Image (tube, coloured by chain):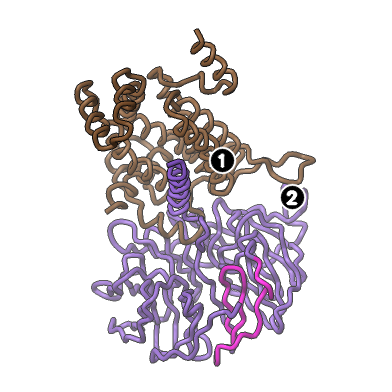
Amino acid sequence: MKNHKKLKIVLLGLLIVGLISGCSSTAGAASSWPGVAADGETGFFAYESQVFAINTRNGSLQWKYPAEADTKIQFFAAPAVTEDTVYAGTYANTLAAINRANGVEKWVFSGADDRYIGAPLALNGNVYAPNSDKFLYVLNSNGALLWKFETAGPIWTQPVSDGTNLYLASMDHFVYGLNLEYPANTLDLDKNGSRTLVSSPLWKTDLGTAIVADPVLFKGSIYAATIDGHLHSVDAASGRLNWSFTNGEGYRAVWGSLVVTEEAVFFGDEDGNIFAVSPENGQPVWSAPYSAGASVTPGGVLTGEGPLFINEEGRVFIIGIDQDPQPVVSLNTAIFSSPVAADGRVLVAPATREKLFTAIDLKGNEIWSFIPSN
Amino acid sequence: MWDTLIIKPFISILLFIYDLIGQNFGLAIILFTIIIKAVTYPLTAKQIKSSKALQDMQSDKDWQEMQKKYKNDRDRLAQEQMKLYKDKGISPFASCLPTLIQFPIIIGLYQSIIQTMGNAPLQMLNLVSKISPWMTNFFSFIPGLQNPITLIPLNSQFLWMDIGRPERVMIPGISFGIPVLAIFVVATSFIQTKLIGQPGGDQQQGQMSGIMNIYLPLLMGWFAYSFASGLAIYFVTSNLITIVQYAAMGKANLSNLLPKKASTEKKTGKGSK
C-alpha cells in the first residue's frame, strides 16, 4: 500500500514535469530552422550545434564546425561566405569566422548581447552582422569592431547592399539606409566609452509592422514584406516609399524569401498564397493568388527555369508569370528553411532524421541527401 | 479546437492588456493572471469548501467508527461511506468538478503566456499565426489602441529582467548570476503548499503531503530557473493570489508554517489532557 502511494507521487511528479515541459516550447526542441548558404560547389548548412560544409555535387562532407559538437552553442543563422572565410552567428551571442578551406576557427566575436538569427553579409573584407540585441555589428576581416548601429528592435534579416550603401530591415518596423563605412571620427561613444556608434542613418522608413523576411534589393528599390502580409517597395536612394501591396484581409505573415524578377515580385504567405506583384507599381499581376496548399514559410529562390517555391509540407514547384505551376517534387516533410540555388541544384533543409539536408535538380530528382554520422 | 477556443482568445486578451497598460509585458502577465484567477474564483471557492467538508468528515465520529467497523470489508466500507456522504449532504466529487473546469483555463493561461514570450523564429511563427484583432476591434472606442500585430515584437524588458529569458542578477564579486525570481518561486510555492495543506489525515497522507511540500516547490523553482522569466512571474503571481484567496476564505492554515516539532508537541500536550 505504501509503495502504491509512493508510486502515485512519482507518477504525479512525472505528469507535472511532462505537462510543463510539453507546454514549454523552449524545452529541448530546436527553436529555429536550418540556415542555408551556397557558394560555387559548396553548400553551408547551420543547424543546431554545428555548421556543415558540403560538396553540392555529391553531398560529401568537407568539414564541420566545431569539429566536436558543443550543445551549448547553436547555429541557425545562414552563414555568409567569402573566398576564404565563412561567418556563422550563434545562439550563444557569438559570431565565428571559420577558414573556408578546412573549417578551422579564425576568430570569434563576442561583443553582442543576444542571438544571431539573421544571416550576416560579407562585403569588401568586412562582415555586417545583424543581432537580436537590436544592433548591427560591422567587423573587419580580423574580427575587430569597426562600427555598430542600433535599431529599436531585434534584427532577424540579412542586410543588403548595392556596393555603395547598406540597407537594413528590422523588427522595429523600419528599413534603414546606412553607409558601408563610417570614419571613426564621425562615430559616437557607446555605453563602454568606445567610439563605435553610428548616430543616425542616412534615412529610415516605417513599414508599419515587423520585418522577418530578408529584403531584396533590385534595380534601386528595396522590396520588403512584413508580418501583416504587406509588400513594400522603398527607393534605395532616398528611403521614399514607392508603393505598398496588401495580400488581403487579416494577418498573413510573410516569412520566406521573396523572388524578384523584371516581371514580378513573387512572394508567399503563411496562408499558403503566392502573389506576383508588378515591381513598377505594386499592382497584382495575377487576378487571384496561387494557392500552394500550405503555408509558404520557406519562400522561394530564382532558378534557371523560374521562381521555385516550397510550401511547409515540402511541396516543391516552379511558378512563372503565367501562373502555371510546374510540380518538381513532394518531399512530404515539414520545411521552414529558404531554399538556395547552387550550381544548377536546389539545396533544401528538411532537417529530419532521414534527411538533414538534401539537393534536388529542377526535375525533382534527389541528387544526394546528408545526415551527420555523429 | 484548443487553439481556437482557448489559446487565441487568451493571446488576444494578453496583447490587449499589454497595449492598454503602456506595453509592459511583465505587468500584462501579472494583470492577466489576476483576471483569470478572479474569474475562476467562484470555482476555487467551491473547491476549497468541498475539500474542507471532506476533510472535516474524517474527524467525524460516525466516519471513524465506520472505518474501524468495516476495515476488512472494503466494498461495504465504500457503500457506507457513500451513504454517510448522502446523509451529511456532501458530494465527494464536488471538489473535483471545479478543478476539472479550472484545469484547461489554467493550462491555457500558462500556454498563452509561454507562446506570447516567444523570441525565436519557430515560436514567433507560431505566435504570429495566432494573433487576431478581435479584442482591439471590440474595444475600438478606447483611444490609442494599436493593431495587435504592430505590437510585435513585444517589449520584453521588465524591471531588471528580460522576460523572454531565464532571470539572473549579477552581483559584483560573484562569478555567476543569482536566480532571484526562481528563489521567489520556490519560497511562494512552499508557503502556498504549506498554508493550503489541511492538518490531520493518516500517517501516509501526512508523508505524501510532506513529500509534495518539498518537491513541488523545488520543481517549480527548477522551471523558473531554466525557462523564460515571464513564466516565473506567472508562478509567483499565481502563488500569491492563491494564498490571498485561501486567506480571504479563512482557510490559510498558518499553523502549518510553524516548525513541525513544536506543533507535534502541542498535539501531544492536548492529547494527554
Asked where in the image residue A267 lies, by quadrant, the reply is bottom left
Amino acid type of the residue that numbered disc 1 sits on in the rendered structure:
Leu
Q: Which chain comes out purple in the rendered image?
A: A
In front of the other: A229 or B262 = B262
Q: Is residue A243 above or below residue B156?
A: below
The residue lying at 43 percent from left, 45 percent from top is A4
Mark 2: amino acid = Leu
**Residue A232 place in picture, x, y as percent:** 41, 64
Image coordinates of residue A316 in percent, x first then y, are: 37, 81
Q: Callout 2: few (<14), some (14-19), or many (20+) C-alpha neighbours within 10 Å? A: few
* Residue A54 inside the magenta-drawn segment: yes
Q: Is residue B152 above or below residue B249?
A: below
- Identify the residue position indicated by label 1 in the image: B218
Residue A10 position (above or below residue A108) = above
Colour in which the image shows chain B: brown
Residues marked 2 and 1, same chain: no
Question: What secondary structure is found at the residue carrying circle 2?
Answer: strand
Q: Is residue B207 magenta?
A: no
Q: Position of residue A129 (x, y in %)?
A: 63, 65
- Direction from residue A287 to residue A208 in the image, left or right: right
Residue under numbered circle 2: A189
| Chain at numbered mark 2 | A
* CB atoms of marks 2 and 1 within 8 Å: no
Q: Judge by depth and name the residue closer to the eye, A72 or A232.
A: A72
Whole-number angstrom distance, CA of label 2 to CA of label 1? 45 Å
Quadrant of the drawing holding the N terminus of chain B: bottom left
Tag in front: 2 or 1: 1
Q: Secondary structure at mark 1?
A: helix
